[in-house]
Amino acid sequence: MAKAKTLACGCPVAAFQKMISGKYKLRIVWDLKDGPLRYGEIRTGLLRGSAGSAEIAPRVLSRELKALTESGLIDRKDFGVVPPKVEYHLTRKGKSFVPVISAIRNWGTRHLAEAGSGERLGIAAE
Amino acid sequence: MAKAKTLACGCPVAAFQKMISGKYKLRIVWDLKDGPLRYGEIRTGLLRGSAGSAEIAPRVLSRELKALTESGLIDRKDFGVVPPKVEYHLTRKGKSFVPVISAIRNWGTRHLAEAGSGERLGIAAE
DNA sequence: CAGCATCCTGCGTGATACTG
DNA sequence: CAGTATCACGCAGGATGCTG
């Protein structure tokens, strides 16, 4: 069986971990749940609520996007015009993944509030 | 460094990512759902189904365990005897997290089958 | 606007050896 | 048995500058 693709583990969890490894993947999918977004919009959306002082390196976002595309969670739609316009949207697979993230967020909202450092967060989950 | 705790994000997902960052954390929690396990048992359980050729460095497992403990997902029970005996078990918070992992596994089993390389998996999830 | 090319750094992870 | 100490490496990910 050689070494397979580092996915020889019968455990779905490992594959999941690899798939969403990266700081933005989950958030990207989540942001995409409401409809297609353009590159810049994703970028902006990612910054919203982030540390603030850190811009997202294009290389990083680009890579995450590509990885997600190869994972089959999202799809890339290039309009092939100038100025460039590219939209990313969830695939069927990606959409099926949204509830999972929802569960995660749900749990996180309930149990991670105190995990920070006494942070105040008036978020309403959705 | 200062830089806050990298948790200034109001997004539960980010916190979640940090919490389960690490190759074994999710699996540890999952394995612990059936009851307390000792250090060695966790280690053995982790190897079961893994690449096989890679032993888990004690340092790594130790760190994951400590991180999980500090996250409040698991608890450490030291029997204080010789030879040493230490058991790890899920906290209430940890237990509440199990369904989330379950959701992940569930999804993974259904949608990640084809993601590998034509892997066959006769697992029944539970 | 949507990326890619290059450099650099921190940390997660593995391997090995040692201790209470 | 249950860890800690030390060394080394690869890769995620940030910063900058450039292009179609």
Image (cartoon, coloured by chain):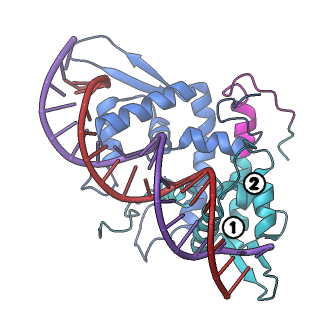
Chain colours: A blue, B cyan, C red, D purple
Whichever of labels 1 and 2 marks the residue nearer the N terminus, that label is: 2
Q: Which numbered disc covers residue B46?
A: 2
**Residue sitting at 41 percent across and 32 percent down?**
A63
Residue B112, magenta (yes or no): yes
User: Percent from the top left, x then y, of residue B88?
Assistant: 75, 73
Q: Is residue B95 left or right of residue A32?
A: right
* Letter of the chain that mark 1 sits on in the rendering: B
Q: Is residue C13 above or below residue B79?
A: above
User: Percent from the top left, x then y, of residue C14?
Assistant: 62, 50
* Letter of the chain that mark 2 sits on in the rendering: B
- Residue assigned mark 1: B94
Numbered label tally: 2
Q: Which numbered disc covers residue A73?
A: none
Quadrant assignment, res B5: bottom left
Per the rendered image, the range of residues in magenta is B105-122
Quadrant assignment, res B73: bottom right
**Residue sitting at 65 percent across and 36 percent down?**
A6
**Can you say which quadrant of the picture contains the N terminus of chain B?**
bottom left
User: Percent from the top left, x then y, of residue B76?
Assistant: 70, 78
Q: Is residue B32 visible?
A: no
Report the magenta stretch's main SS. Answer: loop
Viewer-nearest of discs 1 and 2:
2
What's the amino acid at mark 2? Leu
Q: Give the secondary structure at mark 1.
A: helix
Q: Residues within 10 Å of mark 1 (few under 14, many from 20)?
A: many
Q: Residues within 10 Å of mark 2 (few under 14, many from 20)?
A: some
Q: Is residue B42 left or right of residue A102?
A: right
